[in-house]
Amino acid sequence: MSLKQTLTAIALAAAFAACLPAHAAMPSAAKGPHAKVPCSMCKKETCFQCHQSYDAVAKKTQKVNPNPHFNHRGEQECTNCHKMHTKSRVECNDCHTFNNLKMKGE
């Protein structure tokens, strides 16, 4: 390993270590099994381990009009709307105004 690579590795490790306390202190909105999912795993494939598929989720929200899980944008990442460390949001409302779309628990 060259000196440049060693110094870069040390700088990255120090930066990462500096972020850990701040990240650990972040309030998590996640409850139950969701609270244990690290941010690095927040991809729809991880969600589908319990929630089966995008179609299965769309079926659960089929009475919502419009159905946010069956839309013109296709299968989006779950984290576009569902957040672990901040308030969740309805991404549809970036372009539309759907006042009736609420996140579970709102």
Image (cartoon, rainbow, N blue to C red):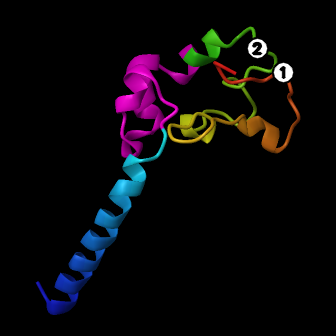
Q: Secondary structure at mark 2?
A: loop
Nearer to us in this view, 37 or 71: 37
Q: Which residue is mark 1?
A: 100
Which quadrant holds residue 8?
bottom left
Magenta span has 40? Answer: yes
Residue, far left: 1
Question: Is 16 drawn above or below residue 22 in the view shown?
Answer: below
Place of residue 80 in the rendered image (x, y in percent of width and height, measured from the top left)? 61, 41
Mark 2 belongs to which amino acid?
Answer: Val
**Which mark is drawn over residue 64?**
2
Residue 44 falls within the magenta-colored stretch: yes
Q: Secondary structure at mark 1?
A: loop
Which segment did they paint magenta?
28-56
Query: In the rendered image of this protein, does residue 68 appear above or below residue 8?
Result: above
Q: Residues within 10 Å of mark 2 (few under 14, many from 20)?
A: some
Residue in view at x 64 percent, y 18 percent: 105
